[in-house]
Amino acid sequence: MIARVLVPMDGSEMSERALEYAAEAYPNAEFTVLNVVGEPSPLWGEAAGIAVADDIDAAARELAEPIFERARAIVDDADGDTALDTEVALGHPVRAIINRADEYDTVVIGSHGGTVAERLFVGNVAEKVFRRSPVPVVVVR
């Protein structure tokens, strides 16, 4: 029985589909939505803004909050008795997901992001998570 599900979300349509699928497939499970923010660096796009923040964790959480709001809406719309926790991690997405995966029964991840760059990067993330995860992984297209 699947009781605990990890759903990495990056704000893409595919990550939202992954959560929708998970909520439908495992209606009574506990979910954790994980948003991974790259460690602060000028090369990390939006994450570069948190490099100058006094509290990097709070800045990362603020950056992730719109994703978490959408996740709450998806779970609220789903049938079932779904509990939702949210987590923010700093670092490389694959490592952050794999480091938490063994705390869950399964990982449900979107196959890729929305833009061409996201498809290359997130698709690569999904593949690496699939290959390295200590628990079963469902990749949603």
Image: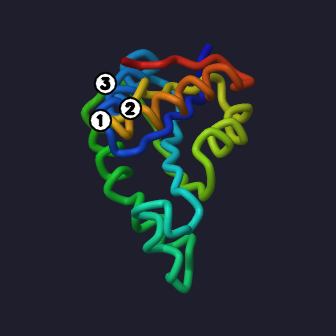
Q: Are marks 2 and 3 in contact (CB under 8 Å)?
A: no
Residue 84 lies, in percent from the top left, at 46, 42
- Numbered disc in front, either 2 or 3: 2
Q: Is residue 94 above or below residue 42?
A: above
Q: Are marks 2 and 1 in contact (CB under 8 Å)?
A: yes
- In front of the other: 42 or 137: 42
Helix, strand or loop at label 1? It is loop
Q: How many marks?
A: 3
- Numbered disc in front, either 1 or 3: 1
Give the residue displayed 38% in from the left and 39% down from the top.
118
- The Cα atoms of the two marked residues, 1 and 3, are separated by 26 Å
Q: Amino acid at mark 3?
A: Asp
Choose the circle earlier in sequence order: 2 or 3.
Answer: 3
Residue holding disc 3: 79
Q: Are marks 1 and 3 in contact (CB under 8 Å)?
A: no
Residue holding disc 2: 119
- Quadrant, the N terminus: top right
- The Cα atoms of the two marked residues, 2 and 3, are separated by 30 Å
Q: Is residue 93 left or right of residue 77?
A: right
Residue holding disc 1: 114
- The Cα atoms of the two marked residues, 2 and 1, are separated by 6 Å
Give the residue displayed 68% in from the left and 36% down from the top.
98
Helix, strand or loop at label 3? It is loop
Q: Amino acid at mark 2?
A: Arg
Residue farthest toward the bottom in the current orientation of the protein: 54
Q: Amino acid at mark 1?
A: Gly
- In front of the other: 94 or 78: 94
Q: How is the image coloured?
A: rainbow
Q: Is residue 129 left or right of residue 103?
A: left
